[in-house]
Amino acid sequence: MKTIIILLLIATSAVIADDFSSSEYQAQQRNQKLNKLWQAITENKQSGTYPSPLEIASIFTESMSVTIDYKSDSLPEGRKKLIHSVGVVGQVKFVAEPDTPYTGLFKGADSALVRFSLAKPPNYSKPEAKYAFDNYTPGLGLKFLADGVPSANLVAMWGVNGVDSFNFFDKDMNTHIPNAEGLQLKLVAKKFSTATPIVQNVGLRSFADRNQDGSQVSEPKFPFKLTFRAPSDIKNRFTDNFTREYSQIFAEIQPGTTVLEVLAMDDPATGCLKKIGSLITTSEFTTSKFGDKNLFFQHQAYTNDIELHSQWSDYTPYFSFFGSNLPKKPEGKCPFASLLGL
Ligand SMILES: *[C@@H]1O[C@H](CO)[C@@H](O)[C@H](O)[C@H]1NC(C)=O
Ligand SMILES: *[C@@H]1O[C@H](CO)[C@@H](O)[C@H](O)[C@H]1NC(C)=O
C-alpha cells in the first residue's frame, strides 16, 4: 500500500513538472496556458530560498544550453534556479504604441507574465543607498504567451553588480548589460559562454516571429535592444535607502497599473531610444514558490538576432574573460526627444 502511494506521488509530481513543457501544454490557447501557470504560481505564495554557496557552485557543472535552448515555461525536473532565486510575479499585458514598426508580439500581447527578482540574497544590515552596490541586484523576466506555440521570453537588468540605491527601479533595465565586475561574476559569465559566445545580450527575434494567435510572421522586425523604465509614480514608491522589502511594495500595486514603459533602440549606429509600448498589470503581484522554483524564462541567444542583422555584430560584445571587446559604440546622435526616450 505504502509503495503504491509513493509511486502515485512520484507519478503526480512528474506530471506537474512536465506540464509546462509537453506538446499537449504548448498546443493550448494562450489564456489557458496563462491560467494554468497562474494556478501553479498562486497555489503556494511562500517564497523559495536562495541557494547555498555549495549549490551555487553547481552552476559550473550544469549545462548552460538549458538556459539558452530549452523551450518550456518551467525548468526541467531537478534543475535549480541558482541566480534570481527569489522574486515576485504578476500578470501583465503589453500595449504597443500604434505606430510601432515591429512585428509579432511587439504589436501587442494580452497574456504575459513579469517576474521581478534580485540576482542574489541582499544584505540590508546597512540601509544607506551606497551599500546597495554589489549587494542589491534587481532584474526582470518577461514571458509572452502565444496560442499553440512556445512563449517568447527575455530577461533584463541594469547590470549584474547592481546600483547605489535600494530603489528597485533606480536605473533602467536593459536586454544588454555591461561587463561583470569581480572574479566570481566573471566566472559565471565564462560558464554562460560555453552555451553562447554573447553572454551580455539576450535576443528578441522570437518576440517578432510569432503573433499571439500563434501565426508565424514571414519577415520579423525587431530592435537591437530593449530598455524597461518604470514611470515616476512606480519608481517613487521605492526609496534609495532601504526601508521595506521590495515584495511588500510590489504587493500594493493594483491591477490596471502601468508598471513599465518599454523603449527600443532600433539601430545601434544612432543609439536612439523610442517608446514602443507599456506593460500594464492585469493581476496583483505575489511571492510564489512555483515562481521561484519552477517558472522558467529562456535566455534567447543573441546570435539568432545577428543572423538577420549582421551589422549589429560590430556593436556586440563577444565573451572574453578579460572584458569583452566592443568594436563600436552607439553614437547617441539622437534628436532631443529621443534621448529622453519619448
Ligand atoms: C551583512 O553586512 C554586515 C555589515 O556589512 C556584515 O557584518 C554581515 O556579516 C553581512 N551578513 C551576511 C549574511 O553576509
Ligand atoms: C539615507 O541615509 C543617510 C544616512 O543615514 C542619510 O544621511 C540620508 O539623509 C538618507 N536619505 C534619505 C532620502 O532619507
Image (cartoon, helix red, strand yellow):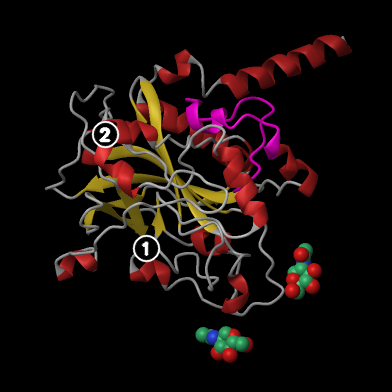
Q: What is the secondary structure assignment of the residue under circle 2?
A: helix
Residue depicted at 22% across the width and 50% down the height:
267
**Residue 277 visible (yes or no):** no
298 sits to left or right of 189: left
Give the image quarter of residue 182.
bottom right
From this view, report whether residue 17 is shown above or below residue 179.
Answer: above
Q: Is residue 254 above or below residue 240?
A: above
Could you tell which of marks 2 and 1 lies nearer the N-terminus? Answer: 2
Mark linked to residue 230:
1
> So how many labels did they put on this image?
2
Our reading of the magenta stretch's main secondary structure is loop
Q: Kindly identify the amino acid type of the residue bearing the numbered disc 2.
A: Ala
Marks 2 and 1: which is nearer the front? 2
Residue plotted at (36% across, 21% down): 149
- Location of residue 236 by image quarter: bottom left
Q: Position of residue 309 (x, y in %)?
A: 25, 37
Relative image position of residue 170 (x, y in whole percent): 45, 69
Residue 164: horizontal and vertical position, in percent? 54, 73
Q: Which residues are magenta?
A: 59-85
Note whether ligand 2 is within 8 Å of mark 2: no
- Is 20 on the left-hand or right-hand side of 222? right
Name the quadrant where ligand 1 sits.
bottom right
Which residue, as the protein is rendered here, is positioned at the far right?
Answer: 2
Mark 2, Cα crowd under 10 Å, few <14 / some 14-19 / many 20+, is many
Q: Nearer the viewer, residue 137 or 186?
A: 186
Q: Residues within 10 Å of mark 1 (few under 14, many from 20)?
A: many
Disc 2 to disc 1: CB gap under 8 Å: no
